[in-house]
């Protein structure tokens, strides 16, 4: 089978991973493009001895970790100021945590992708847990029309040390709560109780102030088509606890960076 046929089905989820890792749709997509360009120039870079999804993530990780922000040589594309905060912590622990918690790779697969031993991977995931524990607490708005899911999300983010300012079930409630409470993070379902879209509500909120957003949907593939705009942080239903933890950590990490830039420019 041609390599293109092996790679194409993996691209939507690879884009999701790249965006979560870089904190930006544009920057994450540019790394995916760099990965594909590398593959076009050298098909031997694709490891046919492992599963296709592992192989493309492995190549992506080689490129990501070869960039100056993350440790080594010339950068490929537009890199945001927020992304430069990657230098403030070790990048590999976050990669290990995202690969296992969000992308669903087994520890063996994640170790293969990052070119580390299983013992080293375990240490990286432990380090990521310490980074999450050390994160400054924030306020969170949940936009979710299913009460049980909303309660689960509230319990998860509260357990991470954050405070939920409210749960909105409709577009109007979401916008009103966001404007009144100015949360540091928004967790938004795509389909709301009044038949409206969480995307629409979030876009209206973002017209008032900047805030990192994590979208939650039972149909993530519908939002990973390659068309713009697309979410930077995306959780699939039914979600795992570690997935929520990982993306809350990432979103707040880059949200804190944006807030720091605003304070410096004020």
Image (tube, rainbow, N blue to C red):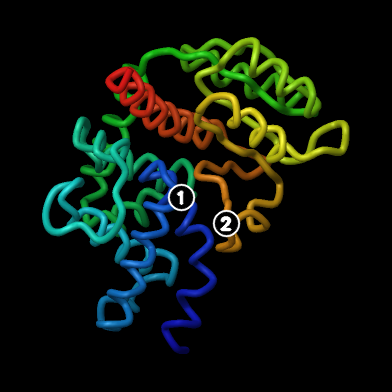
Q: Name the quadrant containing residue 30.
A: bottom left
Q: Nearer the viewer, residue 69 or 245?
A: 69
Q: Residue furthest right?
A: 194
Instruction: Name the residue located 33 percent from the left edge and 28 percent from the top edge.
Output: 257
Residue 42 on image: x %, y %: 25, 82
Q: Which mark is residue 25?
A: 1
Determine whether 39 is above or below 239 in the image.
below
Cα separation, mark 2 vs mark 1, equals 9 Å
Q: Which mark is residue 228?
A: 2
Instruction: Name the residue located 44 percent from the left edge and 51 percent from the top edge.
Output: 17
Instruction: Label 1: state its secondary structure.
Output: helix
Q: Residue furthest left?
A: 72
Of mark 2 and mark 1, the one earlier in the sequence is 1
Instruction: Label 2: state its secondary structure.
Output: loop
Instruction: Name the residue located 21 percent from the left edge and 51 percent from the top edge.
Output: 117
Within 10 Å of disc 1 (Cα), the crowding (few <14, some 14-19, many 20+) is many
């Amino acid at each position: 089978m041609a390599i293109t046929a092996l790679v194409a089905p993996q691209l939507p989820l690879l884009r999701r991973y790249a965006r979560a890792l870089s904190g930006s749709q544009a920057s994450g997509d540019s790394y995916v493009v760099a990965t594909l360009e590398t593959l076009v120039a050298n098909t031997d870079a694709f490891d046919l001895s492992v599963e296709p999804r592992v192989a493309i993530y492995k190549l992506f990780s080689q490129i990501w970790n070869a960039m100056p922000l993350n440790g080594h040589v010339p950068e490929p594309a537009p890199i945001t100021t927020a992304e430069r905060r990657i230098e403030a912590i070790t990048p590999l622990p976050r990669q290990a945590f995202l690969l296992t918690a969000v992308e669903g790779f087994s520890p063996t697969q994640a170790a293969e992708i990052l070119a580390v031993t299983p013992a080293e991977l375990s240490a990286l995931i432990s380090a990521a847990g310490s980074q999450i524990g050390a994160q400054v607490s924030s306020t969170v708005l949940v936009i979710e029309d299913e009460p049980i899911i909303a309660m689960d999300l509230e319990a998860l983010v509260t357990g991470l040390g954050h405070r939920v300012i409210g749960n909105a079930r409709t577009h109007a409630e979401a916008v009103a709560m966001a404007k009144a409470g100015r949360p540091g993070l928004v967790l938004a379902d795509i389909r709301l109780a009044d038949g409206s879209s969480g995307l629409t509500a979030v876009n209206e909120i973002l017209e008032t102030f900047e805030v990192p957003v994590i979208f939650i949907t039972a149909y993530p593939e519908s939002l990973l088509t390659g068309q713009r705009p697309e979410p930077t942080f995306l959780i699939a239903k039914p979600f795992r606890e570690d997935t929520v933890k990982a993306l809350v950590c990432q979103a707040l990490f880059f949200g804190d960076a944006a807030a720091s830039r605003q304070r410096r420019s004020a």
